[in-house]
Image: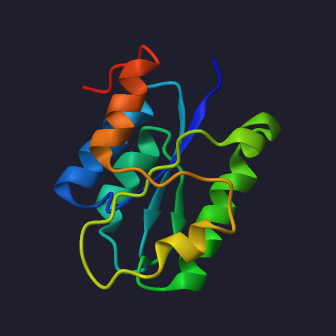
Amino acid sequence: METSAVLVAGVTGLLGNEICRKLSTKNLHVKAMVSSTSNRIKIDQLTKLGVPFVQGNLQNEGSLRQALQSQLDGASYSMQKSFPGLMLCVANGDRIDMENVLSKFPVKLMSVKDFANSMAKAQLSIA
């Protein structure tokens, strides 16, 4: 089975942090997107679990593009070709035009619920 790549935003918050922790225990290429003002202690805790991070900001289109490209660059060649499961957990704030940004990448934007359902169908449990 091919490994899915996941970029998680909001990882220093309660929900995003727990999602990132759960996903890091699965057969997924997980990367945490953090801002320059993110809680360093929480970032270090995820780093100890083997979760790499990339700096980005959901309110800045250029920053988001760089974070997405970073995730693609870290993926295997076959993953870059199909990229079946990229998830962005968007908590709040002004939304940028995600459809426009993502149209430049071979990715799929999913809610946490839809991503969990897709993993369940693939015989993985993230609960």
Q: Residue at x 75, y 45 (%)?
A: 80
Q: In this view, does 86 lie above or below 118?
A: below
Of residues 88 and 117, the one nearer the viewer is 117
Residue 55 at what x, y percent from top left? 52, 71
Residue 83 at what x, y percent from top left? 65, 43
Quadrant holding the C terminus = top left
Q: Residue at x 26, y 81 (%)?
A: 93
Q: Is residue 81 above or below residue 10?
A: above
Task: Please indicate whether residue 117 sits to the left or right of residue 67 in the image.
Answer: left
Task: Please indicate whether residue 31 sits to the left or right of residue 1 in the image.
Answer: left
Identify the residue at the far right of this view.
77
Of residues 104 and 2, the one nearer the viewer is 104
Quadrant holding the N terminus = top right
Residue 111 at what x, y percent from top left? 33, 50
Identify the residue at the far top of this view.
123
Task: Please indicate whether residue 55 sits to the left or right of residue 46 in the image.
Answer: right
Q: In this view, does 117 lie above or below 12?
A: above
